[in-house]
Amino acid sequence: NFLFHVIKLVLFVSIIPVFLIYFFAPQIAIFIFHKTQLTSVFELIAISLPFFLLHEIAVYYFIATKKLILFGWFMFIVPNVLFFTFIFLFRNDSINAYNIVSFYGISFLITLIIEFCFIFFKQINFSKPQFSYKKTLNASLPMMFSGVMSFLINWTDVLMLGSFSTEENVGIYNAAFKVG
């Protein structure tokens, strides 16, 4: 029951960034990254955002229920295998930023469907404890802010390079940084 509670809350709260990213995609693409062709990519990211968030909830549900093997599979293996499968299958088509983000979003959507099958299609006895949305939000807001700050700290170099250089240079830098 708490899982349903959190899913509803996350979907409701995610409406704000989804609409902001989607409707301000041209401004983000032009004023921050100076690349008009990224507008459709940001719109696609906005549409995919709920899939990414629900995926995070599902994998941490597996941790909470001590199903660590499922956590490992769905966190590290399934989405990446699907993503690389899409890239391999469509390698002869034009591989551009929009296609890559599409493959990534579709990979997480398929992973999410499989995760929900593992979570919801088994014999579950639901209890009806009452959860307060306000209490859940108050408990999670500090973690959300620290997560956003951690994201910004970890990705500032890539975001700044993306603003000043080409996608190819950002990709090379990001790969080299991770290998290094």
Image (cartoon, rainbow, N blue to C red):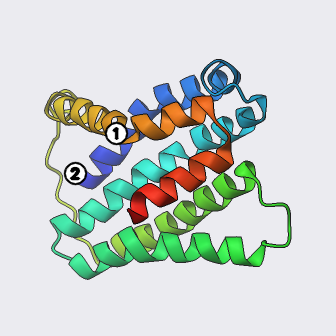
Asked whether, in this view, residue 57 is left or right of residue 169, the answer is left
Quarter occupied by residue 43 = top right
Asked whether, in this view, residue 56 is left or right of residue 22, the answer is left
Instruction: Name the residue carrying label 2.
Output: 2
10 Å neighbourhood of mark 2: few (<14), some, or many (≥20)? few
Q: Which mark is residue 29?
A: none
Residue at 43% in and 37% down: 157
Above or below, 127 against 132 in this view is below
Q: Which x, y percent locates residue 108?
A: 52, 61
Residue at 41% in and 70% down: 115
Type of amino acid under label 2? Phe
Residue at 47% in and 64% down: 112
Above or below, 28 against 131 in this view is above
Type of amino acid under label 1? Phe
Q: Farthest right residue?
A: 93
Q: Which x, y percent locates residue 51?
A: 50, 52
- Which residue is nearer to you in this view: 105 or 114? 105
Q: Which x, y percent locates residue 161?
A: 54, 36
Instruction: Name the residue carrying label 1.
Output: 151
Quarter placement of the C terminus? bottom left
Upstream in sequence: badge 2 or badge 1 = 2
Q: Which x, y percent locates residue 167?
A: 66, 45
Above or below, 54 against 138 in this view is below
Asked whether, in this view, residue 22 is left or right of residue 113, the answer is right
| C-alpha distance separating marks 2 and 1 | 26 Å
